[in-house]
């Protein structure tokens, strides 16, 4: 064993190899140390040390892999339109083309060209939000979680926020409304019961300490049966009568282009002239990650004066991408917003796409494929109870177990789901430009298996 250990190369010798001349020394040292330690453990178990050249080559490979980009594009065949795990809403190449010159050049993000003085970054968005919602003013922050934090911290620090017990929800990623309100310095005043809250419950809870009546969208969770929540219009009226602020965290608000009967659009919500409303930029809106707040100007002005805003400030990319997205709504050009376009495919389109992918995949004789009706989902906690009828392909491989096949396609960047021992490829989020890539993925796996 001592002999085996004595064959291990010295770290300093490897470091001096010419191939490593331009490598980062700290990272290289770490990789060599880990690798030699592994060889040492092997030697203790009686395994021989590989040749020196092989070791150098292996370390070089590990180094390269460590520095290669970890982010990679994926093909979404799950039928879930905005998946938080897969990056939520995606952008059209046209939008990226539109904002690229802005990203690569200096720009008037915070510069008023007319007056030659400092401008405001939020101005680029608030003009459009006011036009869309006929509201007084708006502001944009990092995400909707930031919006909740900023609003509570600005108006409800050490004061009571009245919220229904049925709306104290947890959203994915351990974002819990009660915890956020407390973290922001607010005092939570719960009213009603889990399943039923009446207007009276709010009215009776109002005291000297109250500052806000908040409504929180239940998001990814739905109550059925013996339930009641107070409509936002009534909360607005109650708040107004008592000189309080009303606030609605809508979560995944939408403007138009989504065929749902269960949810009012943001435009409908805005018609009631609320004090403050907030929603996400990258859920049903189909834009960049952002939290958009709109409502009364005097309240938005106060949000702008909160020092926390600096910590929640959006980058220029967000402003550019959000402006392009909102302009698409105003110009009635929502087909350029992929999220909206995916919602709006007809059954015929989805069936036609299934047929053309089926034609390709049936060329692989070991694949058994058929077209099947499926139901797609909005995702990211939006419209949880709604199914959007779709079409896709159900398939299995005659020689590879479905579970294994699914792992193999996933490792090649195709994300699908399994049902009844078959892989389902939902057409909802698939562009026909990806079909040949999907075919190649299955073909490669098939060829590899035959070897
Ligand atoms: C999604 C959601 C949030 C958080 O929004 P992010 O943009 O992901 O930070 C907050 N409140 C509700 C009701 C939501 O649905």
Image: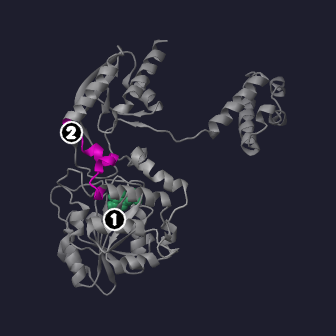
**Between 5 and 139, the one nearer to me in the picture:** 139
Q: Quadrant of residue 45?
A: top right
Measured as percent of width and height from the top left, residue 375 is found at 24, 38
**Between 321 and 409, the one nearer to me in the picture:** 321
Image point 29% across, 47% down: which residue? 335
- Which residues are drawn in magenta? 329-347
Residue 148 position (above or below residue 376): below
Specify the label residue 23 is tagged with: none
Which residue appears farthest toward the front when viewing the image? 114
Image point 26% across, 82% down: which residue? 206
Can you identify the residue that label 2 sits on?
346
Decide whether residue 399 is among the magenta residues.
no
Image point 80% across, 24% down: which residue? 4
Q: Within 10 Å of the Cα at label 1, are there few (<14), some (14-19), or many (20+) other Cα atoms?
A: some
**Between 399 and 48, the one nearer to me in the picture:** 399
Residue 434 position (above or below residue 164): above
Where ligand 1 lies, by image quadrant?
Answer: bottom left
Instruction: Decide if residue 84 is on the left or right side of residue 359.
Output: right
Measured as percent of width and height from the top left, residue 429 is found at 33, 39
Ligand 1 under 8 Å from disc 2 Cβ: no
Instruction: Determine the main secondary structure of the stretch shown in magenta.
Output: helix
Measured as percent of width and height from the top left, residue 240 is found at 23, 81
Measured as percent of width and height from the top left, residue 87 is found at 42, 47
Q: Within 10 Å of the Cα at label 2, are there few (<14), some (14-19), or many (20+) other Cα atoms?
A: few
From mark 1 to mark 2, how far is it between C-alphas?
30 Å
Residue 207 position (above or below residue 427): below
**Between 125 and 223, the one nearer to me in the picture:** 125
Answer yes or no: is residue 93 visible: yes
Circle nearer the N terminus (1, 2): 1
Q: Quadrant of residue 417?
A: top left
Q: Name the quadrant of the N terminus.
A: top right
Can you identify the residue that label 1 sits on?
128
């Amino acid at each position: 064993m001592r002999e085996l250990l004595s064959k291990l190369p010295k770290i300093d010798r490897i470091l001096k190899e010419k191939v490593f001349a331009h490598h980062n020394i700290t990272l290289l040292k770490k990789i060599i140390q880990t690798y030699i330690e592994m060889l040492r453990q092997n030697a203790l178990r009686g395994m021989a040390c590989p040749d020196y050249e092989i070791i150098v080559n292996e370390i070089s490979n590990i180094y390269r892999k460590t520095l290669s980009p970890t982010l990679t594009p994926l093909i979404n065949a799950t039928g879930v339109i905005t998946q938080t795990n897969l990056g939520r809403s995606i952008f059209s190449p046209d939008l990226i083309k539109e904002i690229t010159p802005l990203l690569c050049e200096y720009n008037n993000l915070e510069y008023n060209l007319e007056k030659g003085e400092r401008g405001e970054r939020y101005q680029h968005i608030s003009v459009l939000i006011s036009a869309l919602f006929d509201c007084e003013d708006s502001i944009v922050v990092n995400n909707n979680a930031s919006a909740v934090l900023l609003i509570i911290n600005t108006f409800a620090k050490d004061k009571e926020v009245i919220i229904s017990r049925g709306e104290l929800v947890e959203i994915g990623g351990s974002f819990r409304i009660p915890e956020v309100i407390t973290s922001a310095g607010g005092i939570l005043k719960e009213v009603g019961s889990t399943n039923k809250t009446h207007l009276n419950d709010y009215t009776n809870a109002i005291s000297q300490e109250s500052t806000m009546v908040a409504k929180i969208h239940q998001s990814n969770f739905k109550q059925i049966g013996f339930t009641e929540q107070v409509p936002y219009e009534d909360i607005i009226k109650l708040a107004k009568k008592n000189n309080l602020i009303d606030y609605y965290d809508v979560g995944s608000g939408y403007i138009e282009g989504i065929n749902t009967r269960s949810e009012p659009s943001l435009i409908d919500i805005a018609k009631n002239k609320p004090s403050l409303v907030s929603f996400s930029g990258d859920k049903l809106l189909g834009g960049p990650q952002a939290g958009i707040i709109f409502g009364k100007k005097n309240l938005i002005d106060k949000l702008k004066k909160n020092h926390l805003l600096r910590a929640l400030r959006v980058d220029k990319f967000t402003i550019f991408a959000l402006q392009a997205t909102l302009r698409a709504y105003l110009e009635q050009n929502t087909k350029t917003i992929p999220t909206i376009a995916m919602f709006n495919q007809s059954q015929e389109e989805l069936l036609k796409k299934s047929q053309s992918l089926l034609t390709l995949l049936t060329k692989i004789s070991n694949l058994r494929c058929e077209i099947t009706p499926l139901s797609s989902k909005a995702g990211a906690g939006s419209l949880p109870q709604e199914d959007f009828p779709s079409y896709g392909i159900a398939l299995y491989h005659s020689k590879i177990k479905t579970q294994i096949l699914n792992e193999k396609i996933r490792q090649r960047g195709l994300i699908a789901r399994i049902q009844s021992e078959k892989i389902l490829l939902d057409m909802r989020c698939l562009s026909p430009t990806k079909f040949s890539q999907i075919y190649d993925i299955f073909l490669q796996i098939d060829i590899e298996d035959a070897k």
